[in-house]
Image (cartoon, coloured by chain):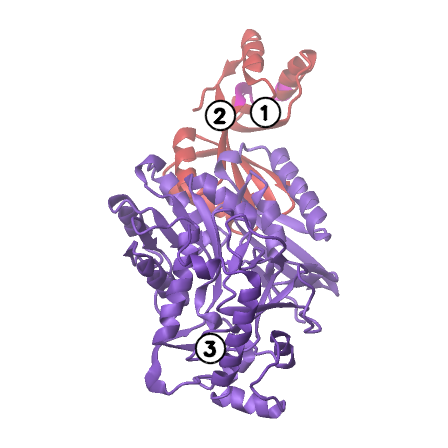
Amino acid sequence: MFFEKDKETIPLEKLRALQEEKLRRTLKIASRSEYYKRIFKEYGLKPEIKSIRDIEKFPFTTKEDLRKSYPAGMVAVPFEDLIRMHASSGTTGKSTLVFHTKSDIEDWAILVARGLYAVGVRKTDVFQNMMSYGLFTGGLGLHYGAEKLGALVVPAGSGNTQKQIELLLDLKTTVIHITPSYLFYLGHIIEEEKIPLSRFSLKIAIVGAEPHSEETRRKLEKMFKIKVFNCYGLSEMNGPGVAFECEYQKGLHLWEDHYYAEIIDPETGKVLPEGEEGELVLTTLEREGMPVIRYRTRDITRFIKGRCPCGRTHRRIARMKGRTDDMFIVKGVNIFPSQIETVLMQTPEVDKNYRIIIERYEGMDNLTVEVEIKKECFDGEISHLKAIQERLVASLKDVILVTPEVRLVEPGSLPSSTGKAQRIIDKRRL
Amino acid sequence: MGKQLSIFVENKPGKINKITGILEKEKINLKAMTIADSGTFGIVKIITDNNRKAFDILKRANFLVSLQDVVVVEIPDKVGAFHKVAKILEDEKINIEDAYGFIIEEGEKAALILKVPETEKVEKILKKQGYKLIENF
């Protein structure tokens, strides 16, 4: 059950040899860009390697480097060979641009198609793409992949929930691509309007663009009675489709014939032994328009050991634990929002929206988690609310090792969004 | 049986005002209110002249609200009237979880609202003693 059987099940030795060969080519192409020409010279490096591990001699490329080479300092081909540009959301400072040639776009579509196929999407499916189109890669990335597969693609974009529901029902949509927070919202609206789930033909949801926990996935699967799959990507590496879960939902296969992946210690930059958790660093192996060498993704993950029963040889990475820049330190302890989310999702009385606020009073860090109580769980008894509150404090402390303050807030007062939800507010002046 | 509305509110300025504003707009008469506070949040308990309507409206306005059974009993507005009721309940070994009240007619009649574990049982006891119960749902 593969989109490209030979490539997806390639024996590991062959895959490593292929990576080496592709890296040589990539370094050559990269050295034609203004940025890498300068960097290679600065570091006294030739765009050559003896073995794949020689990649560790090359410096990392960061988001900041991309920003500094705005708009097109990393482009390695004549401008006329480019056919597409995408930009990252750019929450801080100027957004970063990524340019693609025709074959880059074609490759991207294939990688997405591989992933879609792996989770069970076929040409008979109706694929409603509920991610925003435009500069953001979530829309067009999956769009092209699903078309490549031959599914009927409905480019619905994000938002406009009533129209989405209408399309889901009328077109008998079987597969959707959506952010986890929007999927929750959609479920909430469907429930509120009392539309029976049996009227939908939905089987699969592909969720991405926001880090989310395994519990969130399970909740969404239960809510809609469908399978929910995780998809990973970032605009600097094309966008969604860098890694994709398969039917087994045990980690995401990273397409190693297109990306060389390293896991590093974010503090020291040293490559970590396989299986250890650290920051994912990626090098494009097939890209022509804008190769990127050793890109610091800021995403925290690890390689999952062992072969996946699905037969794909490309190694799996674990669900993203968070981002190095999402991680916050409270009272000297490293905390990821995903750890907090996991606890909240295991608490039945708590609704899906939450907010984490970090403050500092007189030199002391204070962590507050704001949650909404589900309407159906409210019986008017203050003692019951207090018990929920105390239970949350205790179970959060077990996981994050810091005692948080848990604040119950009124329903609808926490942000829920159709895009990326802002869940952490750090008010400390560090 | 008597009813009261319990509403979840955050402990912030303007929260009570929001509730009373909604009731005023819908021409619902607020008879009594009491607040149980727990730090950053509290429960506002109210009795109105139309609890069903108030419940629906507050729910629609996205409040966490619940209807609770309470005993609403009419007592004379005079010294010792509450004590008499409390004594009856003590004799029956019934614990009063919460109590508040409002005047119906100055110097004549008042309403006493009691939150007890077994509302029906208490209603029966008080009825037997000749008290008038107010059904306000």
Residue, far left? A170
Residue, far top? B128
CA separation in Å, label 2 and label 1: 10 Å
Query: Which amino acid does the dot numbered 3 rest on?
Result: Thr
Highlighted magenta segment, given as a residue range: B70-81
What secondary structure is found at the residue carrying circle 1? strand
Q: Mark 3 points at which residue?
A: A96
What secondary structure is found at the residue carrying circle 3? loop
Q: Name the residue under label 2.
A: B3
Give the foreground label among 3 and 2: 3
Q: The red chain is which one?
A: B
Query: Which amino acid does the dot numbered 1 rest on?
Result: Lys
Which quadrant, please, contains the C terminus of chain A? bottom right
Q: Residue A250 carries which label?
A: none
Give the vertical position of B98 relative to A408 (above or below): above
CA separation in Å, label 3 and label 1: 62 Å
List x then y, in percent, for residue A298: 59, 68
In primary-sequence order, the first of circles 2 and 1 is: 2
Query: Which amino acid does the dot numbered 2 rest on?
Result: Lys
Nearest the viewer among B15 and A279 is A279
Question: Is there any visible trace of residue A235 in the rendered image?
Answer: yes
